[in-house]
Image (spheres, rainbow, N blue to C red):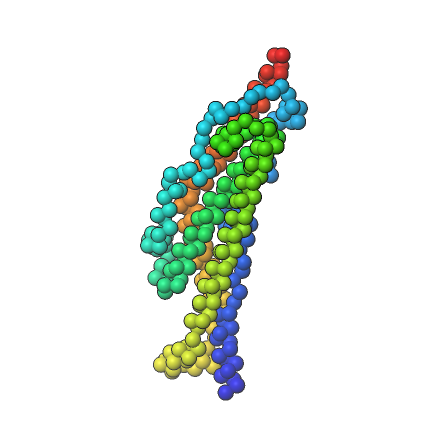
Amino acid sequence: MSYLLCRTCYVVAAFNTTVPNLTNDDILDISGNSNDDDHNPSNNLQTNSSSSSSSHIEQGPLQQSADYNGCNECDNRSYLDGIRILNWFANKSIDGNLMIPDHVTYVYVITLASILDKWVKDDNGRKLWKVYLKLGQNCDYWAPEMFRSIQKSDNSTKIKFIEEKINVLNNNIHSLIDDYNKCSVVYKTHRKRNCDVQIIKNLLELSGLSIRNMVFPKDNFDNSALKLQQYVRDYIMQRNEHFRKSIDIKIQTAKAHAGHFLLLKDFMKAIK
């Protein structure tokens, strides 16, 4: 009796594994995004402190561009529909019927997709505003988005405005990562509770096998859950490819405009 109890505990333990918590760096590694612009947003620009303090040139809202969430294709979130996700699995030769065997797993996949989609948009938005902040501080160049909310104001007001935006996005991202990890815990609990030892014993009896001789793969749940997460992340990153490229274009455009702005300042200083 004690031996059977030990084997029963082993069956449950095989499913009682820990789902590792996700961090923002984990998603960055998976998505292949780089935050180099955060560290050096004004690279390829010949900037120095004297250039920023040279003769003043009034900068107005001459260039108008959409905000980072103004992409029409990205506003249409129909790609978060569960059926479309399953169809994508099928097109990738991923057996959705095996990967998503029940309603809980189906809802889990949809929830993951929604959370990751919000994360992609907020993380790229934060990346954009960090570049705008650095260009403003280092080059005294302020992106057109600034003039939508702030017309003519001093630099300290502009810096505070951008820092508040970044802070909101930071809070959103932290909340999304918490939701992602909670979602994984809930799903792990569901899988654990569905490990009915009595059903396992009944099935084995039909085959004439004994639970005493059965060896269960300890990593089976972790591997399947991580693969499912990876597939959902791949799907979301693919669906947001246009959005992510549009952010990169905005960043490169802002850098180019900042470079031209500095050249104009140097030119005006030289002719005086």
> Given the current orientation, which residue lies at the most extreme top position?
272
Which percent across, then down, holds residue 162?
56, 37
Query: Foreground: 173 or 13?
Result: 173
Depicted 150 relative to depicted 10: above or below:
above
Query: Foreground: 21 or 58?
Result: 58
The number of callouts visible is 0
**Quarter of the image where one finds residue 107:** bottom left
Residue 107 seen anywhere in this rendered image of the structure: yes
Which percent across, then down, holds residue 60?
51, 24
Q: Is residue 185 left or right of residue 88?
A: right
Which percent across, then down, holds residue 84?
33, 52
Q: Quadrant of the C terminus?
A: top right
Residue 231 seen anywhere in this rendered image of the structure: no
Q: Is residue 32 left or right of residue 157?
A: left
Q: Residue at x 50, y 41 (%)?
A: 125
Q: Residue at x 51, y 73 (%)?
A: 13
Query: Foreground: 29 or 146?
Result: 146
Which percent across, then down, holds residue 192?
46, 70
**Quarter of the image where one finds residue 229:** bottom left
Q: Residue at x 56, y 43 (%)?
A: 167
Q: Residue at x 52, y 81 (%)?
A: 6
